[in-house]
Image: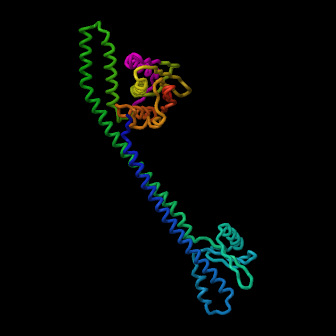
Amino acid sequence: MKSDVYTRKIWWKIAIISFGTIIGLASLLYTESFLGELRQEEDRKIKLWAQAVEEVFFAEDDTNLSFFTQIIQDNTTIPVILTDNTGAIIAHRNLDVPETNPDRYLQRKLEEFKSSGQVLENQFADGQTNYLYYKGSTLLTKLRLYPLILLAVIGIYMLISYMAFSNARRSEQNKVWTGMAKETAHQIGTPLSALMGWIAYLKEQYPAEIAFGEMEKDIDRLTDITDRFSKIGSQPERSDSDINQTIEITTDYLGTRLGKKINLSTQIDGEAIAKHNRQLISWVLENMIKNAADALEGEGEISVRKEDQGNLVQIWIKDNGKGIPTADQRKIFHPGFTTKNRGWGLGLSLAKRIIEEYHGGKVALLESSPQNGTTFRISLPLN
């Protein structure tokens, strides 16, 4: 049975993003509707302006001349250029014409207005035709950018909210896990000390018993685990040490504890001194080898192979088990994801954090299928 303890958190984030998207789209649609009305209003004003210009140019009396002149003067926002049928500029308005080369400037603006496609054609009674080219007002141009600015502001706000929420949750989770880990280490310490005393006592009473050697290995392993838990929350120390030895100690310990029908083989090539935390790398290897053993379901092969490639140490962990379903392969490093009936789904996520954040390396799933099993690769820098 699959479980993911972070499903609710993911849905909460999706809800935030969806809510922000709806607000953005609603604002965009409303603004576009408003811009459409404003464009229509400006078109009506331009047509009225063109009619006023016609009346002024061809008026037979001055009865309404002041009225039409006022209409022309009231246009203080929409830039316009009036030409005759030959393309010569007759008049213009609302353009910042420079004192130097004004004709060249007006001609360039005329070409720009023509490309926008906004033109009115006036047919006069004497057979003449004038063309009125115009462009949206400065206000309309600014308003066209408003939806994009609004979406950008909403996007930035959603991003900041998302990051703040994620960081707060992550900080809270880290504090909880750190507290639990340190308390676990403290609780294990007392019985562990007692077990070490009892082992020492039994070895004196039964010096020929060979089982005590394996029991001491388990005690040492528990001591390492306790030390790991006690150091959670603090920056781990790395030192230059033999990575081969770290691998061998881990595989030697697990070799007799995975099951009688599970064969764990090791191939270590080259000698490499790498800056690493031995306890943490050992924990990563142990966790991934145990995951491989779970995939074998009691019988199969696990191989650990190490090679030095340039400035990297490459470690492959391969099994011939049942593989990981394709749909789950992208989730395996997510905290809380597990395909097991037991467990918290933290093993691979912690392994990834140890390798990538603490050691500057990489851990990746190379392949997984029922036919070929599963192969992981760990890459660690030598220094």
Q: Position of residue 350 (x, y in %)?
A: 40, 33
Q: Position of residue 190 (x, y in %)?
A: 24, 25
In this view, 370 is above or below 170 = above
Judged left or right of residue 256, residue 133 is right
Judged left or right of residue 191, residue 321 is right
Q: Which residues are magenta?
A: 236-265
* Residue 293 painted magenta: no
Task: Tell me the quarter of the picture where residue 181 sits.
Answer: top left
Residue at (66% x, 75% y) in the render: 120
In this view, 260 is above or below 282 = above
Q: In the rendered view, how is the structure colored?
A: rainbow
Count of number-bearing discs: 0
- Camera sees residue 315: no
Task: Tell me the quadrant of the picture where the N terminus can be found.
Answer: top left
Q: Position of residue 169 (x, y in %)?
A: 36, 44
- Camera sees residue 138: yes
In this view, 233 is above or below 99 = above
Task: Tell me the quarter of the picture where residue 332 sits.
Answer: top left
Q: Position of residue 49 (x, y in %)?
A: 61, 80
Residue at (26% x, 8% y) in the render: 206
In this view, 279 is above or below 260 = below
Q: Considering depth in this image, is 223 or 152 the residue closer to the camera? A: 152
* Residue 251 painted magenta: yes
